[in-house]
Amino acid sequence: MPRNYKSTAVLQRPDPKFNSMLATKIINKIMLSGKKSVAQKVFYEALDLASKKLPDVEQEEIFTTAIENAKPAVEVRSKRVGGANYQIPREVKRARQQALAIRWVIDNSRKKKGKPMCERLAEELVDAYNGTGASVQWKENVHKMADANKAYAHFGR
């Protein structure tokens, strides 16, 4: 392959309503089978429903605070040392924190059944905004695992 090839990375644009890259990342994670307009509709309807539950908070603040509350500071990674596997706690970089938080919020809203996706996502965003819910619980469990395995932190070098 010649050395002067162009990068295949796609430039993401901020979403049209909030002009926010975070909203674009959430919409892209919601998207299934390339149907971005459906994902945008789900996301914006979820924010409308969430703003009815939290009337004194702006919509942009709802999803930014929800993702912020779901971000993990540490995680555990497996490492094989002398025939045994150890769970080694490590700090999480900022970009991975955001990616994990978005993934947890979307996945936990998908796990709930019996309601349209916009309602499930709205509930998860409101719960994460308030510091409760499955995504924040997941983060706390990851932190507990890291705390329980901090004796193995010296293997992480």
Image (spheres, rainbow, N blue to C red):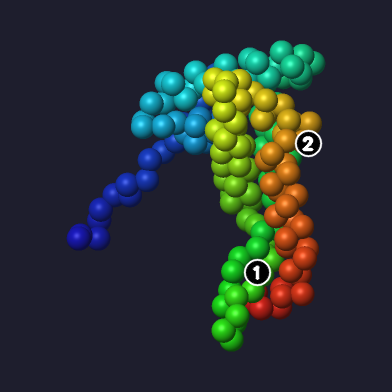
Horizontal side of residue 25 vs 33, given as left or right = right
Q: What residue do we see at 57% from left, 45% from top?
A: 99
Residue 87: numbered disc: 1
Look at the image and tell me whether residue 43 can be seen.
no
Q: Quadrant of residue 67?
A: top right
Could you tell me the amino acid type at mark 2? Answer: Gly
Give the quarter of the figure containing the N terminus.
bottom left
Q: What residue do we see at 72% from left, 19% from top?
A: 58
Horizontal side of residue 58 vs 2, given as left or right = right
Q: Quadrant of residue 131?
A: top right
Count of picture labels: 2
Image location (x, y in percent) of residue 95: 59, 49
Could you tell me the amino acid type at mark 1? Answer: Gln
Residue at the bottom extreme?
82
Image location (x, y in percent) of residue 66: 70, 34
Dot 2, crowdedness within 10 Å: few (<14), some or many (≥20)?
some
Q: Residue 151 versus residue 1: which sits nearer the camera?
A: 151
Q: Residue 115 versus residue 56: which sits nearer the camera?
A: 115
Q: In what element is the residue under mark 2?
A: loop
Q: Earlier in the sequence, mark 2 or mark 1?
A: 1
